[in-house]
């Protein structure tokens, strides 16, 4: 294996203002690693007329496609017994008057579609996005990123395309690509295939980390739009594609691109936008909508006794998600627990901050939606 260590000319540090994270079990002055732990919530939902079944075709599900979210949750629970505090979007490590915030992720079986479509130059953006979007939920400014690229036989031209995407993602995040590892492992992967993982580290002042304790009933949920499926749920997506009979080169029904292009759209990197919103005040919590969708991720930022109402008519469901649901005959509850449904990041803010953010969105600075409110109770209810 070959390490790629780069000497950065800049630490990419800047003041990040303030943000909310989630419930800390404790904050200690020690140098022991800190993480954020999230209590499990009982989720309630209301029926939403997003899906219709007019035949006896079996409904597809994430678990039926090979991914068991409940098993993943159980593993986190067991790990937490060995390493208390594990389970947050990012891990926090005390350093002077700040926390280093670290996150790691991959891009899952979206790689399978990269192999099929030949679109490799943006998959690195996905890789960076999945980690930096996690750590920004704590208010952390990303400092640097490292990657791991593994393959059976190194194709230098292909690897260059992938790394170029990682460089682009770091540019969008205003952080340094500090280094990485290239692993060539004969016979381990199929010819022409590879795997990726990434690691991001950021920093936030201790007095700017928000733990969710200030969230109250009546606070507002602001949704920031996604670019598509992003980088989770692709095991189910691939089952839907196989059932549909469409080629990845076919036009997406109701869309303006091919199906392959729509599915391979790189994950939105929210870092600069979110840090800017945070700097203006009023942000109490942030949820990155990845695996677990709305149903599992939004409650992670709430104190006990609080839940959310989501207004499903607050934004238009993008054509890609309509096609996925209709072609896979996927239940509403499954869609909400698997995909981002067009909203990739949710901010929990005060009513005053909500008015400001929505005013800025109306003026064209960016796109944002008021998608719901915090309520007394637990879980997520959909209207």
Image (spheres, grey):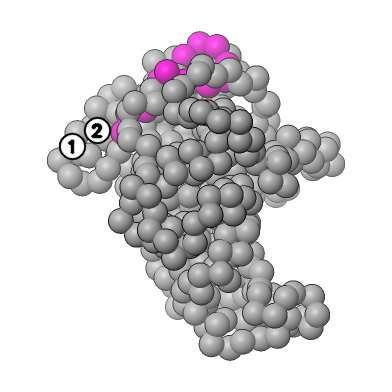
For label 2, count other residues whose C-alpha is less than 10 Å away and answer few (under 14), some (14-19) or many (20+). Answer: some
Where is residue 41, by image quadrant?
A: top right
Which quadrant is home to the C terminus? top left
Q: Nearer the viewer, residue 183 or 68?
A: 68
| Disc 2 to disc 1: CB gap under 8 Å | yes
Q: Nearer the viewer, residue 212 or 235?
A: 235
Residue 316 visible in the current orientation: yes
Query: In the image, which residues are magenta?
Result: 369-383
In front of the other: 266 or 176 = 266
Residue 99, image x, y percentages: 57, 49
Report the residue that reaches farthest toward the bottom.
156
How many labels sit on residues? 2
The image shows residue 187 at horizontal and vertical percentages of: 80, 80
On the image, the x and y values in percent for residue 22 come to 56, 33
In the rendered structure, does residue 300 fall within the stretch colored magenta? Answer: no
Mark 1 burial class by Cα count in 10 Å: few <14, some 14-19, many 20+? few
In the visual, does 68 lie left or right of 116?
right
Element under label 1?
A: helix
């Amino acid at each position: 294996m070959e390490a790629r260590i780069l000497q950065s000319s800049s630490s990419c540090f800047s003041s990040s203002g303030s943000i909310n994270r989630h419930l800390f079990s404790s904050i200690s002055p020690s140098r022991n690693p800190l993480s954020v732990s999230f209590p499990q919530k009982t989720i309630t939902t209301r029926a939403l007329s997003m899906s219709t079944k007019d035949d006896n075709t079996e409904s597809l599900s994430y678990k039926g496609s090979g991914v068991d979210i409940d098993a993943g949750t159980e593993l986190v629970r067991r790990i937490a017994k060995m390493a208390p505090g594990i389970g947050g979007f990012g891990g926090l490590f005390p350093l002077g008057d700040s926390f280093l915030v670290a996150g790691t992720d991959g891009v899952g079986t979206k790689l399978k579609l990269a192999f099929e479509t030949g679109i490799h130059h943006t998959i690195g953006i996905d890789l960076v996005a999945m980690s930096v979007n996690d750590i920004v939920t704590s208010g952390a400014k990303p400092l640097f990123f490292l990657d791991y690229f593994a393959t059976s036989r190194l194709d230098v031209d292909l690897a260059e395309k992938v790394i170029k995407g990682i460089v682009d993602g770091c540019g969008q995040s205003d952080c340094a690509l500090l280094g990485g590892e290239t692993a060539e492992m004969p016979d381990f992967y199929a010819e022409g295939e590879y795997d990726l993982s990434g690691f991001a580290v950021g920093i936030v002042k201790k007095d700017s980390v928000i733990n969710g304790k200030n969230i109250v009933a009546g606070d507002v949920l602001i949704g920031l739009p996604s670019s598509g499926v992003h980088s989770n749920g692709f095991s189910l997506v691939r089952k839907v594609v196989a059932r549909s009979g469409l080629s990845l080169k076919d036009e997406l029904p109701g869309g303006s691109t091919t199906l392959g292009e729509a599915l391979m759209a790189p994950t939105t990197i929210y870092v600069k936008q979110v840090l800017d919103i945070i700097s203006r005040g009023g942000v109490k919590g942030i949820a990155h909508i990845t695996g677990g969708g709305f149903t599992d991720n939004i409650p992670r930022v709430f104190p006990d006794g609080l839940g959310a109402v989501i207004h499903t008519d607050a934004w238009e469901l993008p054509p890609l998600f309509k096609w996925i649901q209709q072609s896979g005959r996927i239940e509403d509850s499954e869609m909400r627990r698997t995909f981002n449904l067009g909203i990739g990041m949710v901010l929990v803010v005060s009513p005053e901050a909500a008015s400001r953010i929505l005013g800025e969105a109306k003026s064209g600075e960016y796109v944002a939606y008021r998608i719901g409110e915090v309520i007394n109770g637990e879980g997520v209810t959909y209207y």
